[in-house]
Amino acid sequence: MKLYLLILILMFHDILFSQNIIDNYIHIGNSTIIRGSSSDGLKIPRDLDFHTDPQRDDELWVINQTSAVFDGSNGGSTVTFYNAGSNSQWAEYRKDSFSGHFMHTASAIAFSDNGGFANTLDVQDANNSPGGYFSGSTLWDSDTSIYARIHQNGPELGSHWDMIHQSPYSIGIAAQTDNIYWIFDGFHQTIVKYDFQDPHPDSEHGGEDHSDGIVYRYDEVNVNRVPGLSSHMDIDESNGLLYFCDTGNQRVLRLNTSSGFIAQSLNPYGENLAGYYRMSGADFETIITDSLNQPTGIDIHENRLLISDFATGDIIIYNIETDEIYEVGRINTGLTNEVMSVKVGPDNTIWYVCTNLNELHQIVGILMGDINSDNLLSFFDILLLINHLVGSYVIEQENQNSADINFDGVIDIFDLIHVCDLING
């Protein structure tokens, strides 16, 4: 009988798909752990992102709108949580001495695949000029020997890598590749692509020559900023579609980053650039309009779109695997006017920041397929499930939910196939 079951596994293994692990949070349940607080340096945290280097993917970076309570200086800051979610987690607070300009009212952060990250500035003018509009996005090197470490007392302007100042009140950002980022431009009420091209060389971090930058403004896309709230963005790497929250219009849109053409040259404000263009003909659409109050956070993970609603505290999960996008379910955090951003970690746990509580939270779900409750998926779980199916072992009551991977109320051969899929990756 056992041999027969194993043969069936081999027959069906390449035909059936394993259950999407994000759906487990809806169907099975979850628990929340507070992983960071103001004592770590969190102060009005507005966004978070994991480092993209596989050797550093346990680094979770949170960006603060301002400096920590124990700092007292002006400008945004970051808190990096190393070994995020583990028993050995520890936090490091950093603030560049020139962040009063380069992280002025910091509102979003995104890591690119070259180890750099960029942030947006939710302010009209980063020099505090009442009639000015000199604000946009700043690029940084995440090398910890450079970021917020070099040129802190001059003569260069801190450790920033590059900056472009064409988007006042920018409140969302997504990395496309290397030094190309997409920005939610709250002042122009549209979406903009920033190509920093070649940042300052290592010997010139903090320099002021940003003239090789190129800006593409997609004015046909109209969005609405809500003061004090971020409208986060993310790119689906499988197809290049940019998803973004339009908080003021209570909706979510997506744009094909490969579409559109240059329709007009624009005059940059306050700086020389290699190009500043108005784009036309981009392919974009509104994909979610129902049951959203103040969508701010967004993340894409394995054909699932996660949206956090600041007003309700809900984290809504959508299936974007097919043309018809539909809601899978909701996680109710119980935190109204708190959840500003959401991110799925490398271990498939869900993280979010609480802006007013100054906290970082991690949502942990049941590990599906963990039959023996050791918090690991291994061949032992397969053996136990096989023995259960042939009647020589009875799965403990508390583990039956994790054994019923396809949520059909029955533990059978199809659950066994799914466990094999999860273990084999």
Image (cartoon, rainbow, N blue to C red):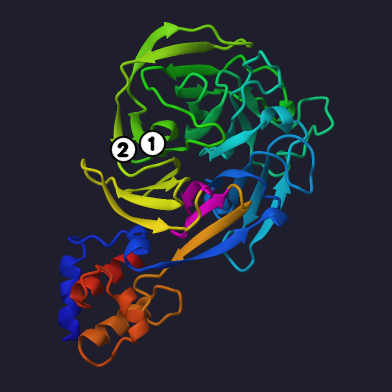
Q: Which mark is residue 289?
A: 2
Type of the residue with mark 2: Thr
- Residue furthest to the bottom in view is 392
Q: Which mark is residue 95?
A: none
Which stretch is magenta?
337-354
Q: Residue at x 32, y 76 (%)?
A: 401
State the residue position of label 1.
Answer: 250
Left or right of residue 404, residue 335 in this image: right
* Quarter location, residue 130: top right
- Image coordinates of residue 45 in percent, x first then y, are 61, 45
Q: Earlier in the sequence, mark 2 or mark 1?
A: 1
Question: For residue 209: magenta?
Answer: no
Q: Quote the CA–CA distance across marks 2 and 1.
A: 6 Å
Q: Name the chief secondary structure element in magenta.
A: strand
* Quarter location, residue 385: bottom left
In depth, the one of 278 and 122 nearer the eye is: 122
